[in-house]
Amino acid sequence: MHRGDLVLDEDLVKRDELIRGGLSYHDVTEIVCKTAETPFLETHKGWLVGFAVAASLATMLILSIAYLIWEGIGIWGNSSPAFWAWDIVNFVFWVGIGHAGTLISAILFLFRQKWRTSINRYAEAMTIFAVICALIFPGIHVGRIWVVYFFFPIPNQMDMWPNFRSPLLWDLFAVGTYFTVSLLFWYVGLVPDLATLRDRAKNKISKLLYGVFSAGWRGSMRHWVNYERAYLLLAALSTPLVLSVHSVVSFDFATAQLPGWHTTIFPPYFVAGAIFSGFAMVQTLMLPARLWLGLKDIVTIKHIENMNKIILVTGTMVGYAYGIEFFMAWYSGNEYESFTFINRAFGPYAWAYWTMVTCNVITPQLFWFKKLRTSITVSFVLSIFVNIGMWFERFVIIVTSLNRDFLPSSWHYFTPRFWEPVFFIGSFGLFFTLFLLFVRYLPVIAMAEVKSIMPHGEEHHA
Amino acid sequence: MLKNYGLLAEYETPHAICEASEKIRDAGYKNWDACTPFPVHGLDKAMGLKASILPWMVLVAGITGCFLISWLMIWVAAYDYPLNIGGKPTWSIPAFVPPAFEVTILFSALTAVFGMFFLNGLPRLNHPLFHSKRFERVTDDKFFIIIEAEDALFDLEKTKALLNETHPVGIELLEEQV
């Protein structure tokens, strides 16, 4: 065989497991475009109700932020010694959720896991919206938000620079880069599908908007060559990036000398936890959407089972990390370290610790049973458990370590005030607002990619 | 005034367009293209396309980003604005690794995306191909070959005959405004 010979991927001709029901290319286009092309007045009632609720909560978040800036961060319950609480808990929670999107779009792409194409668009959108929610919290927790540009290395009249040796600045670079790269990755993937919507658009506004954002894409093979290379490069760049982001987030804690934070296990432990929580969130969002949007043939039980397997693996890794933390606390012989961990499990926040262990370590083990991991209801319920457990994990790490540090005279039991839940619920409102807009107006399945993994046998083109 | 832009041929399957492309490549055409709803693997070889130069652009951008941020960090932290934090060294390479890594990725990713658009001559708002009604299905399920009138070998009758040999489901003459 020499260059120029016709080479078609052998296994593509036989493949039919991932996309069910002998769909043709055109069927895929129709299924995926259906929701985006529904006229405004015929919008699904459930969507309208969901959007009304989510948008109200998002508005509540915006008003709460205005109040926070007006009044100062004293409206939260943060006080000595717990100066970090829900603000940073929420930040780490949302960043972690984002990681599954990148894992699905980049790492599984590099490993040639073809099943990812049915869920990657969805998961990438989740990443972007989750990182937006995450960025809000460190942004507003600084107090004097009008000098937030101090974060950035911008030449200024005071001739002052940020401290590049601080993990908090590393965090800014990591999460900022992560957001930018995720957005680009998502957009590049969207371009050919936006072109599909453009070519099918009936009214002027959608023609114009899809036309502008599809950048004049015409499916030229000369373009696809560069496009595929760009996509591969983005996947290759995102893979170390996503691992670095949560490692850097963990440095915020690990480089501090506080017992319970100052450990070397943090970077891998945080990354595993992030992937774990992110996959759970993908399940939480995907399972209802696949029902409502009629995507059962594209997102099959096999996809759900694969995701549950990843939840099981990462959940077990997280459980292992909890165990090792305890072992190291004892093995180090350091009395502060030992005290912190005994305090976590049996101190005033024991309820939070055991909630975390139940949701993250115990319940995901049910996925060992094939019957349970292929059940949609069980998957959905367990994914909610993981979401709860992973929020508590960050709460346990941050608050239980801070509220009882070295000096017993400074100990103080942290309780949130009225505003913490308002901000947290509001961030869910923002997340779901963006998400509902996405499922309504953009192609939720990467059509071009799904078509490229479909069987290319002649019988499908009759 | 209108002038001929080229001949557009439509195909039903990835196989058909790959076989047709080999014939057109072997006939020696240069200004022609295949348009498909998804990247058809093997079609780049059937068309005789070279590999993309994008990776080299990305490599240069990544190295540039790494050096720029490292220079900024060292200059800021060790010379322009040295801060004494617990007596730790100001010239602290390990502490500079995370931002240097992130900025390398940032520059590379921006170049991968914008470089791809640049190499493709995109974004553009219009193209002569978009005047064809049947070409609207290129982003759905149909496969097209376009041979441009600019090509040195282009001859309306001969080129049409060549395209006919490749068994297209339809051939269309496209015009453009000049």
Image (cartoon, rainbow, N blue to C red):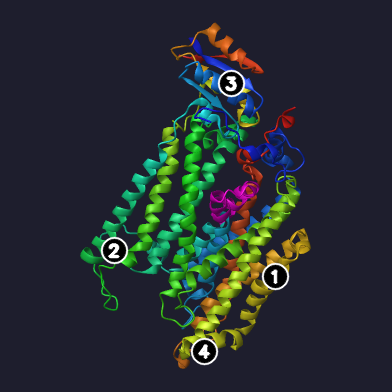
From the image, state whether disc 4 or disc 2 is nearer to you: 4
Residue occupied by mark 2: A161
CA–CA distance in space, label 3 to label 1: 54 Å
Q: What is the quadrant of residue B144 in the picture?
A: top right
From the image, state whether disc 3 or disc 2 is nearer to you: 3
Residue occupied by mark 1: A365
- x, y (%) of residue B52? 43, 35
Label 4 lies in what chain? A
Residue occupied by mark 4: A339
Q: Nearer the viewer, residue A355 or B38?
A: B38
Q: Magenta stretch containing residue A105, yes or no?
A: yes
- Going by the numbered disc 2, the residue's amino acid type is Trp
CA–CA distance in space, label 2 to label 1: 49 Å
- Going by the numbered disc 4, the residue's amino acid type is Phe
Q: Is residue A6 visible?
A: yes
- x, y (%) of residue A270? 52, 68
Residue occupied by mark 3: B20
Q: Magenta stretch containing residue A348, yes or no?
A: no
Label 3 lies in what chain? B
The answer to whether marks 2 and 1 sit on the same chain is: yes
- x, y (%) of residue B127? 51, 24
Q: Give the SS element for disc 4.
A: helix
Label 2 lies in what chain? A
